Image (cartoon, rainbow, N blue to C red):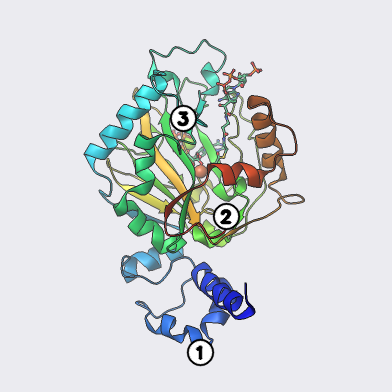
């Protein structure tokens, strides 16, 4: 790459990535045309200039670290996702790479494919065409782009089927920051889209957030000391105290929450008889880069994930977190520039 080409590319990348370095670049004359096209000529850190979000919506996300868009995904699409989820549970389709997790309360019992209610969540559905449609819905990506920029990768996918709590409170998901699991940066270009597949509130174990915590640092995570057991990989923030600050989000079918990877969130136990369903994807900017988590608070999750994967897929120990993420990432818009 010639030096001037490299410089132009760097500028383009930085302009998409945001953050203080990008702001410095935007002050450069070449980039003036970009900043003069600003829709909301103010300093924003967590959202990008576009005409999709209203000023009020942008300010809300900047302040709180999440944003709810009502009625974003159609009932017809949600029905299709639900049908496919049930087919997977019945083992009628077996997408490569898919991971099925049962609640720890029933993890030692025999799996019964006639009963989809044995599944707490499925992850990594990137090879399932029907479910992966969720990550490519134009109405969803339109919003995702406000956070990631135009080159978009789907990194991590889930359908969560939170079971009625067994009485052991193991259906709870401890308060955590999703960034704990992610070895890619920059942080502010990652966003989670989480869509309610039915009415969700505190009663059926809905999403609970601590507004504004996306402005703080990534905190150390580990398994909580819960008497009734904790699900595998459900790490929580150690010594969390500010329970009064929790906000339980109430959603209708199709409503979608977009949230920042540092936002502290979790979900309580499901106190109904139904299985609470949500579908989600974490997206990031394809211009991002991987980091080595050695020596950081993320080292424990790398070790655990590597253990599960090398054992489950009989791979050798030289596999890195980067290899795992690179393998499951899928381009959904623009160009796969880096990650
Ligand atoms: C933003 C969030 C980002 C992320 O979460 S990234 C993290 C990605 N997470 C993952 O990859 C999911 C990890 N889970 C898994 O890989 C699977 O569910 C897991 C644990 C391997 C189980 O797979 P199966 O193939 O069904 O294996 P199995 O039924 O024979 O169980 C193997 C051993 O695991 C145990 N187990 C299963 N589900 C569990 C649970 N929910 N909590 C705690 N332990 C659990 C199970 O009891 C069994 O243990 P043992 O070997 O008999 O002692
Ligand atoms: N005692 C606790 N210790 C640690 N985390 C908790 C505790 N109670 C709740 N949480 C966390 O707070 C978040 C919201 O839980 P919430 O309090 O809504 O549910 P719950 O305690 O299961 O039920 P309830 O609605 O009866 O309080 C979840 O992430 C949950 O893991
Ligand atoms: O749907 C939920 O309970 C939240 C799940 C969650 O936050 C996660 O898996 O990271
Ligand atoms: Fe999460
Ligand atoms: Mg509680």
Tell me if residue 335 comes above or below residue 54 in the rendering.
above
Image quarter (top left, top right, bottom left or bottom right) of the C terminus? bottom right
Please tell me whether mark 3 sits on a helix, a strand or a loop: strand
**Tag 2 secondary structure:** loop
Quarter of the image for residue 66 reads: bottom left
Q: Position of residue 43 (x, y in %)?
A: 46, 77
Name the residue furthest front.
Answer: 2
Q: Which residue matches tag 2?
A: 339
Report how far apart the C-alphas of labels 2 and 1 lie in the structure.
29 Å
Residue drawn at 57 percent across, 77 percent down: 5
| Distance Cα–Cα, label 3 vs label 2 | 26 Å
- Residue at (42% x, 29% y) in the render: 162
Classify residue 4 as left or right of residue 169: right
Q: Are marks 2 and 1 in contact (CB under 8 Å)?
A: no
Of tags 1 and 3, which is closer to the observer? 1
Mark 2 Cα within 10 Å, few/some/many (few <14, many 20+)? Answer: many
Above or below, 192 against 274 in this view is below
Q: Earlier in the sequence, mark 3 or mark 2?
A: 3
Q: Secondary structure at mark 1?
A: helix
- Neighbour class for label 1 at 10 Å: few (<14), some, many (≥20)? few
Query: Does the image show residue 237?
Result: no
The reply, left or right, for residue 8 in relation to residue 90 is: right
Report which residue position mark 1 lands on.
29
User: Which residue is identified by label 3?
Assistant: 121
Q: In this rendering, which labeled residue sits more in front, label 3 or label 2?
A: 2
Under 8 Å from ligand 3: the CB of mark 3?
yes
Which of marks 3 and 1 precedes in the sequence?
A: 1
């Amino acid at each position: 790459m010639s030096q001037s080409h490299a410089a132009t590319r760097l500028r383009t990348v930085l302009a998409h990535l945001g953050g203080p370095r990008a702001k410095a670049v935007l002050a450069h004359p070449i980039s003036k045309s970009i900043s003069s096209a600003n829709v909301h000529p103010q300093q924003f850190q967590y959202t990008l200039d576009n005409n999709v979000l209203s000023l009020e919506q942008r300010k809300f996300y900047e302040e709180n670290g999440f944003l709810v868009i009502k009625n974003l995904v159609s009932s017809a699409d949600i029905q299709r996702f639900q049908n496919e989820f049930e087919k997977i549970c019945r083992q009628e389709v077996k997408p490569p790479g898919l991971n099925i997790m049962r609640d720890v309360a029933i993890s030692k019992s025999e799996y019964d494919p006639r009963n989809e209610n044995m599944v707490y969540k499925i992850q990594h559905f990137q090879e399932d065409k029907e479910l992966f449609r969720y990550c490519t819905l134009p109405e969803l990506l339109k919003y995702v782009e406000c956070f990631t920029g135009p080159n978009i990768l789907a990194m991590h996918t889930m359908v969560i089927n939170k079971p009625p709590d067994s009485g052991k409170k193991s259906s709870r998901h401890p308060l955590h920051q999703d960034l704990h699991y992610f070895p890619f940066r920059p942080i502010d270009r990652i966003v989670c889209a989480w869509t309610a597949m039915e009415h969700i509130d505190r009663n059926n174990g809905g999403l609970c957030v601590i507004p504004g915590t996306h402005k703080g640092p990534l905190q150390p995570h580990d398994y909580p000391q819960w008497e009734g057991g904790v699900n595998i990989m459900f790490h929580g923030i150690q010594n969390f105290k500010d329970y009064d600050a929790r906000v339980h989000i109430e959603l209708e079918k199709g409503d979608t929450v977009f949230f920042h990877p540092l936002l502290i969130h979790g979900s309580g136990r499901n106190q109904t008889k139904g299985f609470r369903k949500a579908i989600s994807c974490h997206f990031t900017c394809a211009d991002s880069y991987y980091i080595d988590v050695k020596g950081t608070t993320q080292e424990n999750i790398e070790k655990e994930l590597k253990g599960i994967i090398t054992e489950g897929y009989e791979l050798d120990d030289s596999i890195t977190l980067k290899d795992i993420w690179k393998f499951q990432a899928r381009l959904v818009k623009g160009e796969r520039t880096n990650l």
